[in-house]
Each structure stands twice: as C-alpha cells, then as structure tokens.
Image (cartoon, rainbow, N blue to C red):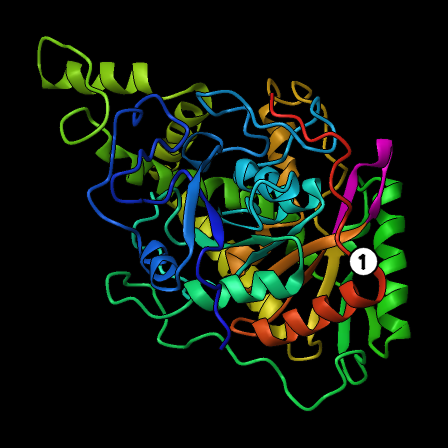
Amino acid sequence: ARLVGEGVPVAIKDNISVEGMPTTCGSRLLEPYVPPYDAGVIERLRAAGAVLFGKTNLDEFAMGSSTEHSAFGPSRNPYSIERTTGGSSGGSAAAVAAGLVPLAIGSDTGGSIRQPAAFCGIVGMKPSYGLVSRYGLVAFASSLDQIGPFARTVDDARLLLEVIAGHDARDATSSVRGLSAPESGSNPGSLRGLKIGLPTEYFGEGIHAEVRAAVGAAQGVLQRMGAEVVEMQLPLTKYGIPAYYIVAPSEASSNLARYDGMRFGQRADGEDTGEVFSNTRGDGFGAEVKRRILLGTFALSSGYYDAYYGRAQKVRAAIRHEVETAFEDFDLLLTPTTPTVAFPLGEKVDDPLAMYMNDVLTVTANLAGIPAISLPCGRGTDSMPIGLQLMGPRFGEDKLFKAARAYENEAAPPYPWPAEPTVA
C-alpha cells in the first residue's frame, strides 16, 4: 500500500495522546496535562514519516456539535467565520478546509468527523468500529468512539486510513481484520452493479430543501454512472437519537469518573477527599460535560438502569440488526450528512436539544459500528458547503471508497480554497 510520505503534515485532534505535547480535550481540567506516551495512531503516523503539525480544537471531551463547548473558544468556519465548523472535531476540519494542513485526524462518536467535514466542504470518514486503535484516545463513549481521517480528496482520506488502520493488542476492541484492499481491474468510472439504498427517513422533516436537492442531484450522478438507487426504509432510525443520548452519556459518566484531581490534570483544594473530587470537577468541567455526566449517571442509577440504559442497549441492538439486514439487499446507503448547512455561532449553544439534533443523520453508523463517509455535494445558503453521506457494511470500506471516489471524480472536485482564510 502507498503510505503518507515523509514530511506530510497531519493535524491531530486534541483528545489523542502525543508524547510531550499537551492534550487538553478542550477542557480546563486537563489544561496542564502532557501525556508520557503516544497513541496507537500517532505511532503509526510517526512510522510512516508524517509530521505532527499540532493539536486542533474540539468541544470539551468531544461532547458537542459546534466546538462552542471548548473551554478555549470555538473554531470558525473558513468559508464564513461567523458560522460553526461543526463538532466535535471542528478544529481538524477547519485546518484542512483552510489549507493549513493536507490531512488531519479526528474522532467520531456520533458524527464528530462527518458533520464538520460536511460543514467545511471536505472529506471526513468514520471507519468500522475496531478498524483503528483507540489506544491513547481519551475516552468519551468507548463502544462508539472511532478515530478517522479528514482530507480534501477521497484518495487522500484512503491513504491516511491505510496508515492508521490495523490491529493493536492494547485496545481490547481492536479487530484483527485489516482494511480491505481497493478493488482492482474494474472500471473506476463505472458503478454498474452497485445497488444503493435511499432511506426515506433521512429525507423527512427538518432536512432543509437545499440539502435534499443537493443530495438528490448526487443521486442522479450515481445513477448515470451505473448505480441502481432504490428508496427503502429504516423505520428504527427515529430511535437513534434517544438511544444514543442514553448510551453515550452513560459511558461518559463512567469514563470521566477518573478525573478526580488525584492522578492528572487540575486539582482543586478541599477539606477532605470528597470535597477535592467535587471542587475539581465543579471547577474543571464545562456545562455541557456536566450535563452529560448527570444524564448518564441518572440512566445508570439503581432503579432506572433497566428503564433507560438497558432499554437503550436493546434499541441499539435492534438498530444494528436493521442496518445489517439492509446490507443483505444493498451495497451502500445514501443520505445527507447534516440537516442544514453550517449554522451561525451562538444560534444553538443555549439549546441542548437543538444542538443534539445535529447528529440525527450520523448516529446510526456509530450505533451499528459501520463505516460512513461524508463528501461535498454542493452549496447552500451563503454558498456554504453541503455534504452527502455514504454508509457501508462493517468492514466494507472498499465499496465505500470506490463509490465516493467515482462520485468525486465525476461531479465534486474539491472546493476551491476559501477566498480569505481568516484565523479568528
């Protein structure tokens, strides 16, 4: 496989450990923390000769869809600095979109790579769960988190994934199954024989007309290239957000219990151990992180576990089964990545439910553990980028990249650089 060559700069989301480099997770609590080790993906990048360009901004502990929950302020969209980059990997997406780096690494728990990629007009890919090691990724929701690439082209995203994918014994969920090889011998400009499902639930209420139109035009391109595109149903989709916002905060409640002021990060004063814990977390965590810890702790608490977390896990299993069954009939699924184009900063930050709904089209891939890619497919309000999403069966990255590359070559060359990249 061709690898990222010597000297290629790669930006790293600031929830991935790099030896000797601060890893804050966008939180005041971890502001002084410098890891003594490299994450698995960082080891692979170094071995491939990549240059670690620096760390990128994110919503605190990756909990958010706009980077506005970062303790260090929001990232800004290079195509309009008054609009969000998306989140939580907004800094990585903005760095690639603005031309600061050709490649970046993010993490995706419910859409945190794909949504910023769509908002910033670049390619973002969430691999199959287990394909990329989570060793050294600061955990948010361990059964959902996955590291993946940002790039300006599908081929570059594939090359970066080739570098970071692979088994790692230090991650108990790491798969021994590697990245599948690209299909050879077939016409790269033809999608003949490919059957793509168009789930109607992803085009309903809340999806802006300009997004529907852009994805509809992309559908036409894929059909002209030989793909068969068929409307189908995924009726359990509507339960994805409720299930996700129980499972993810519950796992966050458990994972973030380690930030107690005793082992790393900030430490507040207190009269006894309990007060140190309380003061450290009270001072160190932002409002959104506290909100999700409270949600998760409640869902896991005695008397509520079966009603909330247990039921959400059953719903998740049903969604996974529904998606796996769909891939018995279809090679890929085509949807919008986001309901709208990038929204103005400040528009949703005080409305948690409105912010959570940004994940409505992306959480299914995380709950089911399948790969999904977002790539540009048009422009909307104020010429802001629109993204389409392709989802494939678990470890079906080869089909995903083939279709994405064919579409990109036919209809969606990379967006031109922003007219006046502005760092604010």
Q: What percent of the width, then of the height, locates residue 41? A: 37, 57
Say which residue appears at 65% left-offset and 79% top-offset. Answer: 328
In the image, what residue type sits under mark 1?
Answer: Ala
x then y, percent, for residue 228: 84, 77
Q: Nearer the viewer, residue 50 or 191?
A: 50
Location of residue 208 with respect to 222 vertically, above or below: above
Q: Quadrant of residue 401?
A: bottom right
Span of residues in magenta: 378-387
Give whichever of 287, 43 is nearer the camera. 43
Specify whether residue 102 is in view. Answer: yes
- Determine crowd level at label 1: few under 14, some 14-19, many 20+ residues with C-alpha closer than 10 A: some
Instruction: Name the residue located 60 percent from the left edge and 20 percent from the top edge.
Output: 424
User: What is the quadrant of residue 197 in the picture?
Assistant: bottom right
Indicate whether residue 410 is drawn in magenta: no
Residue pushed farthest left?
A: 272
Element type where label 1 sits in the image: loop
Q: Which residue is mark 1?
A: 412
Q: Is residue 140 left or right of residue 375?
A: left
Residue found at the very far bottom of the displayed protein: 185
The number of numbered discs placed on residues in the rendered structure image is 1
Q: Residue furthest front?
A: 7
Q: Is 148 on the left-hand or right-hand side of 201?
A: left
From the top left corner, tell me how far across and down residue 174 is, in percent: 34, 66
Instruction: Tell me if residue 28 comes above or below residue 94 in the rendering.
Output: above
Q: Nearer the viewer, residue 165 or 172?
A: 165
Q: Is residue 326 visible?
A: no
- Which quadrant of the view contains residue 391? bottom right
Q: Is residue 386 magenta?
A: yes
At horizontal 75% and vertical 80% (from top left) the residue drawn is 188
Q: Is residue 226 above or below residue 308?
A: below
Residue at 79% across, 79% down: 191
